[in-house]
Image (spheres, rainbow, N blue to C red):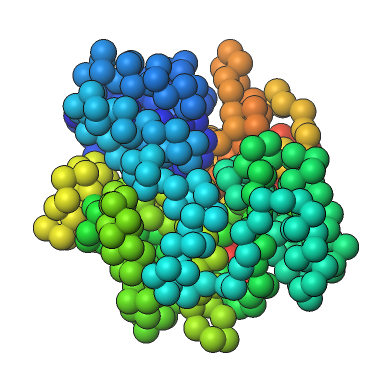
Amino acid sequence: MKILVIGGGGREHAVIWKLHQEGGHELYCAPGNAGIAQLATCVDIGATDVQALADYAAAQQFDLVCVTPDDPLALGLVDLLRAKGIAAFGPTQAAAQIEASKAFSKQLMEKYQIPTASFAVLDDAQQAMDYVRSHPAPIVVKADGLALGKGVYICQTQQEAERAVREIMIDHHFGQAGARVVIEEFMTGPEVSLLCFCDGEHIVAMPAAQDHKRAYDGDKGPNTGGMGAFAPTPTFTQALREQVLDTIVRPTVRAMQQEGRPFQGVLYCGLMLTPNGPKTLEYNARFGDPETQAILPLLKTPLSQIMLATIHGTLDRLNVEFLPQASVCVVAASGGYPGSYPKGYPIEGLRTAEETGALVFHAGTAQEHDTFVTNGGRVLGVVRMADTLEQAIARAYESMAHIHFQDMHVRRDIGVK
């Protein structure tokens, strides 16, 4: 098949790698990155230039287009592609609202009695200030719209909550994404990411993963796009899995059907395993990053077959299998990330790391002559698998030890929690 993947990060490299493993495909990626360029033809069209992407896909007559990032989904790229008769993997613009608007998703959960934190949706800064002043900390303040995974503030004090409201609604740190806020009760317990393939009616759950959002060891420092992930997570027992599918995932899929927004693609349920049972933190409308880098190496079934089954509503006819192993992804980031950081530092040791058995997924890299250089905040994800989580962690760090670039930052406790 002739396949186009939209995006240019580590997640897209993992998707391209998985499709490349199947053999026989002609692979393209827009815009891609230096690592992806080793496996696919990179096309210089930005992921948010949805009309140009749809026109290009139609002109090139792709058999399948995989829309991976949140922004083009929210901008309706899947709708544009399907209008041109192209098989597009991912939710429609209407269904992608489940991620694009936290207010929409929280109100959906409330309407259909899907377990979640109590909340308020506010579009006036003064009302939001009054709300956080009248509710005890800790409390969570979220920008309503898409904010590159960084629009969530977990506030330990009233002063922190007021500052969060100010940054989101008054200082406009996230632009229009912060025109409304969702303010939630603070929940406690282990966090789990459950990603599910979904064809609008049927679901196939992937191995549950855990992401590490904070920049520094011990879950300290600012939120990032994710400093590493592992799958499956031992805290997510088979009994918990069934409970989550029955109380959260299936009701969400039915709710989206009833709202006239059937969900096809990857439904990502961010969960908190609270003392009162599993509750929904958030939804994403696509593969997570870096969870995908940990999960896809465990997938045995051809990914292209699964994508087509989600599009055609035939997921129930496909036997989707995963390896019974543990997988760990450790991210190497630029010094200063998630704040400002320089680019263009040469990266050493990639081939040596791969010779140890690692999968090295490029997130923010470019190529200058014969050398890979840094070109983003999250630069690389190093993935190793093993029979146990402890072995996979040890192997991932053993492989990462071979990679070097100036001011490289790596969390040393991925998988430990």
Tell me if 191 is positioned left or right of 82 in this view.
right
Residue closest to the far left: 317
Residue 108, picture quadrant: bottom left
* Residue 148: x %, y % from top left: 60, 42
Q: What's the residue at 50%, 46% (across, down)?
A: 100
* Residue 194: x %, y % from top left: 43, 64
Q: What's the residue at 24%, 31% (across, down)?
A: 82
Q: Is residue 415 above or below residue 373?
A: below
Q: Is residue 2 above or below residue 252?
A: above
Q: What's the residue at 71%, 34% (across, down)?
A: 405
Q: How many marks?
A: 0
* Residue 335: x %, y % from top left: 77, 40
* Residue 292: x %, y % from top left: 44, 50
Tell me if 104 is positioned left or right of 79 in this view.
right
Residue closest to the far right: 159
Q: Quadrant of the C terminus?
A: bottom right
Q: Is residue 283 above or below residue 83?
A: below
Q: In this view of the protein, can residue 413 be seen by the observer? A: no
Q: What's the residue at 42%, 74% (across, down)?
A: 113
